[in-house]
Amino acid sequence: MTGSIVLTGANGSVGLHAADRLLKQYPQFTVLFTVRNAAETDVNTRNLQGVIKRYPQAKASIHQVDLANLSSVHEFADKVATGSYPPLKAIICSAAYWNLVGDTELTVDGFDKSMQVGHIAHVALVMRLIDRFGSDGGRIVLFSSIGHYRKPNNITSLLPDLPEDLNKLNHPPIDEDKQGRGFQRYSNGKLMATTWMYPLNHYLEQNPRFKNITAVAINPGGLGDSRCFTTNTPLSVKLIQTLVLKPFMSAINWLADPTFRSSADAAVDVVELAVNKAHPGERGYFTLLTRDESDPITMNEAIQQRVWKKSLEWAKITKDNTALWEAGE
């Protein structure tokens, strides 16, 4: 089993561990790691370079792709499509963004940054590269979250239904609750990504050329050591991670939440799904490696179609730049 794997957010918390596992356990693959800043001055990229250096025989490369700029995403897709890389076996959409201390941030494309980095940019990448998969297929791994559920849970309060005009998601309300609104923006992106996965699978299955490509959305669990708790977060969140989440990760997992774990543990599941070792040939939503039910709204076919078409529109996908366009009409 050979081929290429694209991993976004490769110098992030799960990304770094996923990179290590891919290079260690599956050296036959050519791996393209994307990061926002590929310069050696970036400490996170230096960490990724350190991972690659552990495996001198690895077929790995780092690519600077700013997911908050769709031109950058499309340029990378052109590079992959015209390069001499082996056919794709997987696209792992690990990258995400949140801001729990400020109001919504608009990208150069005019979209909410959480929505674009976590969903829109990945739609562009997947749709542009769908014809780079080999005839034996492969897998697309989208990242969901417990936060996508609209019902109250231990992280977020009830999310509203998706608005009739989905464009409103890129212009979310602003109020004094920076932390709550920030998490809501992040959760909206996860809800969109999870919903989008269903029509993606539908159209892949309908197309004889792509029927062997499967898409999954994984809730990787609550990651107590995630760097996200120290990025764009209030001091209270940073202290909670330092004093509670990290030192008592095992106890929380055992006593309160069996999905609460480390980024390294999550990376194992993500990679096993990506290389089709876990649940080979299956599609759908998973919590860790257990098949699960996503929020009921994601199963509404009318909403799925609205999300599908709007996502393609946002991602600047047209009949001229994707081989799966017939599904978008």
Image (cartoon, helix red, strand yellow):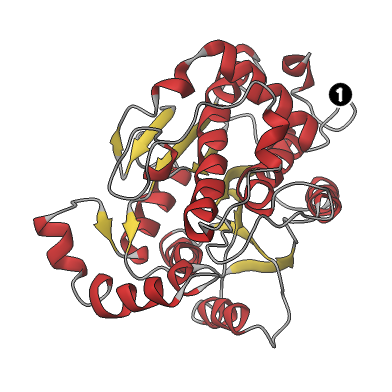
Quadrant of res 107: bottom right
Q: Position of residue 152 (x, y in %)?
A: 32, 38
Could you tell me how many numbered marks the image carries? 1
Answer above or below: position of 53 versus 295: below
Residue 205 shows up from this direction: no
* Farthest residue, direction right: 320
Residue 240 drawn above or below residue 300: below
Q: Residue 122 appears at what percent x and percent y?
A: 66, 44
Q: In the orientation shown, which residue stands out farthest toward the front?
A: 176
Q: Where residue 119 sits in the image (x, y, percent)? A: 63, 43
Q: Dot 1: within a 10 Å radius of its alpha carbon, few (fewer than 14), some, or many (20 or more) residues?
A: few
Q: Quadrant of residue 14?
A: bottom left
- Pick whichever, 299 or 289, lies toward us: 299
Residue 84 % position (x, y):
79, 53
Give SS at disc 1.
Answer: loop
State the residue in front, 7 or 173.
Answer: 173
In the image shown, does 134 or 211 lie closer to the viewer? Answer: 211
Q: Would residue 119 be found to the left or right of residue 179 on screen?
A: right
Q: Residue at x 57, y 17 (%)?
A: 303
Amino acid on which the number 1 mark rests in the picture:
Lys
Q: Residue furthest bottom?
A: 41
Q: Is residue 171 left or right of residue 206?
A: right
Name the residue located 58 percent from the left edge and 79 percent from the top edge.
44
The residue beneath circle 1 is: 319
Q: Is residue 195 left or right of residue 61?
A: left
Occupied quadrant, residue 38: bottom right
| Residue 23 shows in the view | yes
In the image, is 301 to the left or to the right of 34?
A: left
> Quick one: quadrant of the C terminus?
top right
Q: Nearer the viewer, residue 220 or 146?
A: 146
Residue at the image position 49 percent from the left and 44 percent from the top: 187
